[in-house]
Image (cartoon, rainbow, N blue to C red):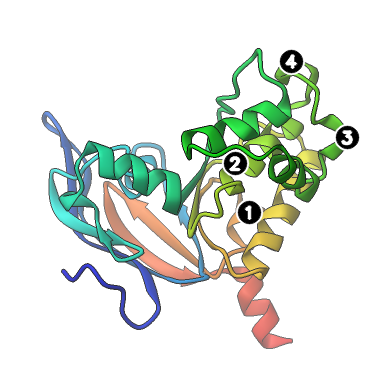
Amino acid sequence: MSDQTHDGMLVRARDLVRSYDAVRALDGLTCEVRNGEWLTIMGPSGSGKTTFLNILAGLDRPTTGEVVVAGQALSRLGHRDLAVYRRNTVGLVFQEFHLVSYLTALENVMLAQYVHSVTDEGEAAAALERVGLGHRARHLPHQLSGGEKQRVCIARALINEPKIVLADEPTGNLDADNEARVLEILGGLHAAGLTLLVVTHNPLLAARGDRILRLEHGRAAGTVVAAVREERSAS
């Protein structure tokens, strides 16, 4: 597989297998994602969704198979190069917020910049403004609601201007109001041209994307056009 992207493809994964002893979390998965596309990944628990995202994030490696993201063949990268890849290419949003408890919202966003070696308080403040949290910049995580914490995580994921955002159940712990806010933010990012891969069980979130990839037992069980896209094209 070439190190270069072709035909606008940002992600090319081929024949991915990830085995943990006798268990195959991924079993020959092949998937491509275009630049600027929102791909939703759905499937039952244990179907390989999070494993796939972790491999794309460079947090895990496939047992066999190849994956290229933004022209980089991840299997050829050592630990240091993978860290640079994560820093420059990928923004991560998790169901669990992973905020540092003794840092303010602003400092938690700046922490991602620190990993990048350059911090800019103004840029971090602007990132919080982008997700509607400029007024909460000096608050600690325990002073924020679940939805506000998730929006801090999104701001942190965006601060280094990644080429792709990988989100694992980003609305899983949120009430309806905060879910709607996160949906609006993700929709805005997609409209601005950012590539999103979103793992979710939430049909409202799934329908916001371009395509839905369904996984079963570590394999692709089918890909369908998301419902909202069908409605738009029919209107």
Question: Residue 194, can we see it?
Answer: yes
The numbered mark at residue 205 is 1
Q: Which residue is farthest right?
A: 135
Residue found at x 33% / y 47% = 52
Q: Which residue is farthest bottom?
A: 234
Q: Is residue 202 above or below residue 232?
A: above
Residues at marks 2 and 4 touching, judged by CB atoms closer than 8 Å: no
Q: Which residue is mark 3?
A: 135
How far apart, in angstroms, are the residues tagged by discs 1 and 2? 9 Å
Q: Is residue 26 above or below residue 72?
A: above
Q: Which residue is mark 4?
A: 142
Residue found at x 36% / y 64% = 70
- Mark 1 falls on what kind of element? helix
How far apart, in angstroms, are the residues tagged by discs 1 and 3? 27 Å
Mark nearest the camera among 1 and 3 is: 3
Q: Amino acid at mark 4?
A: His
State the quadrant of the C terminus: bottom right
- Mark 3 falls on what kind of element? helix
Q: Position of residue 71 (x, y in %)?
A: 30, 66
State the quadrant of the N terminus: bottom left
- Relative to 1, 113 lies left or right: right
